[in-house]
Amino acid sequence: MAHNRLTQLLDQYTSGYSLAQSFYTDPLIFEADWEHIWKKYWLFVGSTAEIPKPGNYFTYQAHHDSVIIIRGDQGEVHALYNTCRHRGSLVCLEERGHTSKLMCPYHQWVYNKDGSLFKARLMPGDFDKSAYGLHPVQVRVVEGLIFISLSSNPPDFDKVVQDFAPFVKPYKLDQAKVAYRKRYELRTNWKLIAENFRECYHCGPAHPEYCRAVIGANLTESAAQVLPERQQAWERKGLSVKGIDFENDSFHFAVRYPLRPGVESYSTNGKAVAIPMGDHTDFDAGVLGLVCYPNFWMDAVSDYVWTMRITATSASQCLVDLTWLVDSQAVEGQDYTIERLTDFWRITGEQDWKLCENNFKGIESSHYGPGPYAPVEADVAKFVDWYIDRLREGVSTAVAF
């Protein structure tokens, strides 16, 4: 019945229009989202700056699965299901920490950082430890950005690495410092956040701070006249400028665009908020924007990197984790303050959270129906088409089996 209902909704979808109400509110659709998108594609979990030393770890809750992300003894990154191979208890109970070994708190089975079983107390002498390591999760690291997939056969990630690496490399994220984190629990569907961040139709009325910083954000002007000159200047600095757009069934995006003349950083007054980051020597790198569906957004200026991680928790709830990264040599209170570093995206983000929650409340109405996208919302339409195509692929594959 659920399968037939989903198939019917997919058949009724009209490209160029917003989704039917059920795609945002129905728990069955939420489960389909997880089955065919979140469990299949690559999920951003964090950066290597969050686990700078061997034994540093953090956990990520992906629907029913808890995953341990831990730095290995040689600096490598391991991703492991946080489920003891004895009787299934969580191994790591804290969201972040440091440990020399991973020990289950229930019966004290002990695992190495790579997930191999080190010790199983009171088990018989012929017990085969090699058969009971923690289950691995597929993990890829792109210049300090950590992605995992819960699928045994995820989409090819090599193109993402190839496209993202030149853009991210100058920031030296593996050597960066986590300056601040903030989590928001939002009452909205995860797709509404993705849609919101793919258009600036709303920016003029909703984001005065953003529009003061970015040419063209208010849609009354264009950066086209200054962009070629800025791209030449960035190329002379060795920065990547060729944008990466969505193609066919790809799932990532990269762009570099200019700030307004005289604006050095994403800040409330346009001035730099920290020292130049990584290989940057000035405050003239524009803005680097990266997206990887379904849950990763990143904006970077010369002096800091801001990452956004979305995690869908139900049809009507999601978590948004924001992280601000600065240069490893930046000293809080001297080279930056938390308030100045975070003000711009805290203000802009909270404006968006209110819009997305209001959007969800309106969609819950008995009189909601799909509406047409404006031409300036073309990237939203592309995202929604991508989403529908991924569900169609998932449904057709499930039927085949």
Image (tube, rainbow, N blue to C red):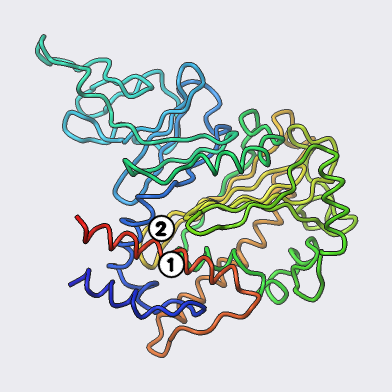
x and y, in percent, of residue 133 in the image: 26, 24
Q: What residue type is labelled 2?
A: Ala
The one nearer the camera, 23 or 15, is 15
Using a 10 Å C-alpha cutoff, classify the residue at mark 2 as few (fewer than 14 neighbours), some (14 to 19) or many (20 or more). Answer: many
First of labels 2, 1 by sequence position: 1
Residue placed under numbered mark 2 in the picture = 312
Q: What residue type is labelled 1?
A: Asn
Q: Which mark is residue 368?
A: none
x and y, in percent, of residue 280 in the image: 79, 36
Horizontal arrangement in the rendering, residue 304 relative to residue 400 (left or right): right
Using a 10 Å C-alpha cutoff, classify the residue at mark 1 as few (fewer than 14 neighbours), some (14 to 19) or many (20 or more). Answer: many
Q: Contact (CB < 8 A) between labels 2 and 1?
A: yes
User: Residue at 37% across / 46% down in the picture?
Assistant: 61
The one nearer the camera, 76 or 166, is 166
Horizontal arrangement in the rendering, residue 393 relative to residue 193 (left or right): left
User: Residue at 49% across / 45% down in the picture?
Assistant: 44
The one nearer the camera, 86 or 174, is 174
User: Residue at 44% across / 67% down in the picture?
Assistant: 187
- Dot 2: what SS? strand
Q: Split into 4 quadrants, where in the image is the N terminus?
A: bottom left
Q: Quadrant of residue 214?
A: bottom right
x and y, in percent, of residue 371 in the image: 50, 84
For residue 398, above or below residue 141:
below
Q: Quadrant of residue 92?
A: top left
For residue 302, above or below residue 111:
below
- Dot 1: what SS? loop
Residue placed under numbered mark 1 in the picture = 189
x and y, in percent, of residue 239 in the image: 77, 41
